[in-house]
Each structure stands twice: as structure tokens, then as C-alpha cells.
Amino acid sequence: MFIDLTLPIDNKIPVFPGNPKPNIKQFSTIKTKGWNEKQLTFTSHFSTHIDAPKHMLDTGKTLSDYPISSFIGETILIDARNQSMIDVDVSNVKPNDFVFFFTGHSNHIYEKDYFEKNPVISEKTIQNLIQKNISILGIDSFTPDNNPYDLHKLLFSHDIRIVENLTNLDQLPERIFCYIFPLNITNGDGAPCRVVAEIKK
């Protein structure tokens, strides 16, 4: 069974404060040109997306530096609901795991205070995950930490990518297999991506 963990790409999805709003419009129609075609304008960190280390580190890797196989892997879900400061046991995490944090924050994506009072992950938990040698961290919020984003930079310095604005994590068991497919942006510092969980029986 497959479950889509991706928010839509549309004009209703809010953008991080200060970022340009998306512009998604009908460029042509069958009636006017003989075919339908949309014009899409948005940043590389819009909707459900993945951050590469280059997002905040001058010398960090871009998405182009990773083989496509590195975006597919075993994933563990950590239930972190009702925690404003997420401090959890990561003993079940294995090397190279993708680790997704289920906070429930994406349920508020269309509310005006979505970018306020978001849960954040403790430095202790991040350090423990680094020691576990994970490959990707995901969260159903717009960020795992807030300005000045020291934990972003800490993860990036250990070659750990970050997936933000996941959704539907409430439909997952603890262990899944996950596919993360970013747009193929040359030297991208990040990109919107389709994230799909496979639940194997």
C-alpha cells in the first residue's frame, strides 16, 4: 500500500514569511491554443520540499551531488505530538534511516499562525540522531528548528538532508519504506518533492 505524504502545489499553500508567493495560472487552454498548460512560479523551498546542505552552507552539497538511490530508503516514524520541544528516545533508529517526526503541525497549514508556535527538535535529540548516522530527517512542519537555524546547519554539516512540510503521517506505522523524488534542479539548494510511503505487509 502506498500513502502520499506530500502537500499540493497550488496558490493556497502558504509560503515562509518574506518569500514570494507562488503564481500558478493557466497559461494556455484547449480553446485558445489547442492544449492545456499551466505556468508555475515558486521557490525551491515551497510546499513539501527537501533541503540540501547548500541551503545554508556555502560549501555544502547540492541535490545534484546525491545519487537518486539515496532518496529511497527505510524510514522510522517518531510520534512527537504535543511536544513543543521534542526530546525523544531514538534507540530504535538504525544507521542510514530516514527519520520522520509526526507532530501534527501540518494540520494547521492553512491557518494564519502556521509559522508561529511550531514544535522544534531539541539539540540533544539531533545530536543523538547524528550519532546514529541517519541520512534524512523529515518533519510535518515548516522547520525542525527556528532562527538562527543552528540545528539545520548542524545536520547539514553531517550530510543529513531535511524534508519539510510532510503530511498524512498519522496514517503510518512506525516502520515504512519511503520514496522522496525532488525536482531535478541542477545544483539545487532544495526542491519541492513528491514523498510517498510504502507500507509493506
Image (spheres, helix red, strand yellow):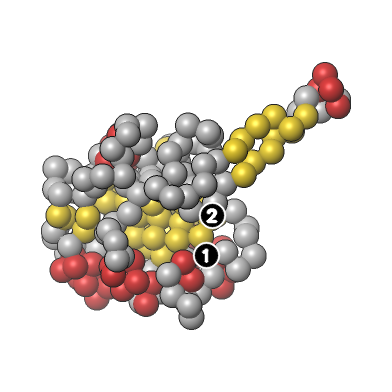
Instruction: Determine the residue positioned at 31% across, 40% down.
Output: 114
Q: Is residue 5 left or right of residue 107?
A: right
- Between 37 and 95, the residue placed more toward the observer is 37
Which residue type carries mark 1?
Answer: Asp
The quadrant in which the C terminus is found is top left
Residue 87, position as x, y percentages in the image: 13, 58
Local packing at callout 2 (Cα closer than 10 Å; few below 14, some 14-19, many 20+) is some
Q: Which mark is residue 189?
A: 1
Quarter of the view holding residue 117: top left
- Where is residue 128 drawn, in percent x and y? 20, 70
Q: Which numbered disc flags the more N-terminal residue, 1 or 2?
A: 2
Dot 2 falls on a residue whose secondary structure is loop
Mark 1 element type? loop
Q: Amino acid at mark 2?
A: Ser
Please give left or right for residue 71 compared with residue 121 in the image.
right
Residue 125 has which mark? none
Instruction: Please say if 43 is above or below 114.
Output: below
Q: What residue is rendered at 33% in x and 54% in y? A: 143
| Nearer to us in this view, 115 or 145 | 115
Along the viewing direction, whichever of 181 and 141 lies nearer the viewer: 141
Q: Which residue is mark 2?
A: 44
Residue 30 lies, in percent from the top left, at 81, 22
Q: Is residue 51 left or right of residue 158?
A: right
Quadrant that contains the N terminus: top left
Instruction: Say whether marks 1 and 2 touch (CB < 8 Å).
Output: yes
Q: Residue at 77% of width from left, 29% of height from top?
A: 28
